[in-house]
Amino acid sequence: MLTRSSLTIRLHPNDDVVIARSQLVGGTRLLDENVTVSGLVPPGHKVATRAVKAGEPVRRYNQIIGFASRDIAPGEHVHLNNLAMGAFERDYAFGEDARPTQYAAEPATFMGIVRPDGRVATRNYIGILSTVNCSATVARGIADHFTRERLAAYPNVDGVVALTHGSGCGMDTQGEGMQVLRRTLGGYARHANFAGVLMIGLGCEANQISSLLGAQQLQEGPLLQTFSIQDTGGTAKTIAHGIALIEGMLPHADAVAREPVSAANLVVGLQCGGSDGYSGITANPALGAAVDLLVRNGGTAILSETPEIYGAEHLLTRRAVTRAVGEKLIARIKWWEDYTARERGEMNNNPSPGNKAGGLTTILEKSLGAVAKGGTTNLVDVYEYAEPVTAKGFVYMDTPGYDPVSATGQVAGGANMIVFTTGRGSAYGCAPAPSLKLSTNTQLWVKQEEDIDLNCGEIVDGNATVEATGRRLFDLMLATASGQKSKSEIHGYGQSEFVPWYLGAVM
């Protein structure tokens, strides 16, 4: 456990920096490091503990987080003024750290909803999916009809939600962008947390319903119904028709009961947004500890956000169960390097301004903290965006770092819960999967407790350990999977955060 006696946190004996617990002013003596602070250092930011010459690497977590852009003296604030991105060779050491997983003798359980085909749900929604932006308004109009009062007769239904988006036309019908969109919509259409799904198109769009159903091998039936605005004769008629169809689904959707199921049925998407200098010390490692418990109880965790593991991917390849799995991850890294080059960008466009204000300087530093969400068990498989996740254990899905896009891909892949760490205060939800929010610092918890489900700042305060907080989180995950509402669900988040990854030219 960290103690509160020190003004800073040292993460590894070989590190060139320590992390400020609170704001440090010039002249403050860091007795643990035998260093005097020069200038102002905000909480969560880095202080140099030894001299680093220009061009030399700077280490945190005993890993390179960047290179000195000028000489750095002991006691200096290490940030944008003197630390920059740089290229260096990574030792992928495929599978070197892979170890047999120690599974629980008696797996934990939660109260889940078992579908007739054996899939297990953590929530019970009816979903309305738009195939194209043109049908988004009618989809929302149908969902808006089903207010809390109108659903009172169906207490086992969590809601009727419209998941709309801004694409579906003006795109290559055979291109990568269309494939990804159809894979995403198909994943939501078959998601266990939907008791029934209504899919609505305009009629003349590139993303034709028939082509979508064929590509995703989906069969229409009483609980998966489709139609288009042009066929029904306009907006008002379409909304009325959609309302009638959902009214027919509601009795079936309500006829469910929760029952004890193994934690092996829990598939958790891991997210971090609005990260700060504490993310890699508190909330992310605590989530990693909970992920280890989940995996040992037979469940699945999905790490994503490829631009935000960049520079730390070698820590994941070392845990790959086979070289082939590790090479799949590196292939996605290479794709991103090519993708950003084509778009005249660079991988270090991340961190965001908010991340930098919180103490993160380079993508290397941010990534090293982000991979801590994945715990310590073996990396068993790697998936492309929105691909169905079939493996049990710790897996990786290639997604952008933008949280709504990333989590949308995870849910399409089968995630029935999202756990989201934040140091700056992200506001997020993800229907139909419940989303838990973790704060990295107590100041955020105090300020924004109405949006945060668990405060991991107690770790840096010296009042809790990573392991104990991970256990608390695992228990909270089981309770949430059993129906306990998350803060984001209470506030109604989840519909607007459906954002499929748009790839390719707009035609």
Image (cartoon, grey):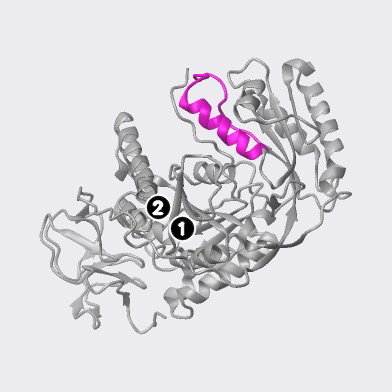
The spot of residue 407 in percent (x, y) is 53, 46
The picture quadrant where one finds residue 43 is: bottom left
Q: Which residue is mark 2?
A: 354
User: Furthest-right residue in view?
Assistant: 153
Structural distance between the alpha carbons of marks 2 and 1:
7 Å
Q: Is residue 156 left or right of residue 5?
A: right
* Mark 1 crowd level (few <14, some 14–19, many ≥20, 10 Å Cα): many
Q: Which residue is mark 1?
A: 424
The number of numbered badges drawn on the structure is 2
Residue 136 spot, x, y in % from top left: 66, 29
Q: Amino acid at mark 1?
A: Arg
Taking depth in this image into account, of 175 and 476 the one nearest to the observer is 175
> Residue 490: where, in percent of width, then height?
69, 56
- Disc 2 to disc 1: CB gap under 8 Å: yes
Let me know if residue 212 appears in the view. yes
The residue closer to the viewer here, 204 or 152, is: 204
Q: Nearer the viewer, residue 54 or 192?
A: 192
* Mark 2 surroundings: few (<14), some (14-19) or many (≥20) residues within 10 A: some
Q: Position of residue 179 (x, y in %)?
A: 52, 28
> Is 114 located above or below residue 228 in the figure?
below
Answer yes or no: is residue 352 visible: no
Q: Give the SS element for disc 2.
A: helix
**Residue range highlighted in magenta:** 163-189
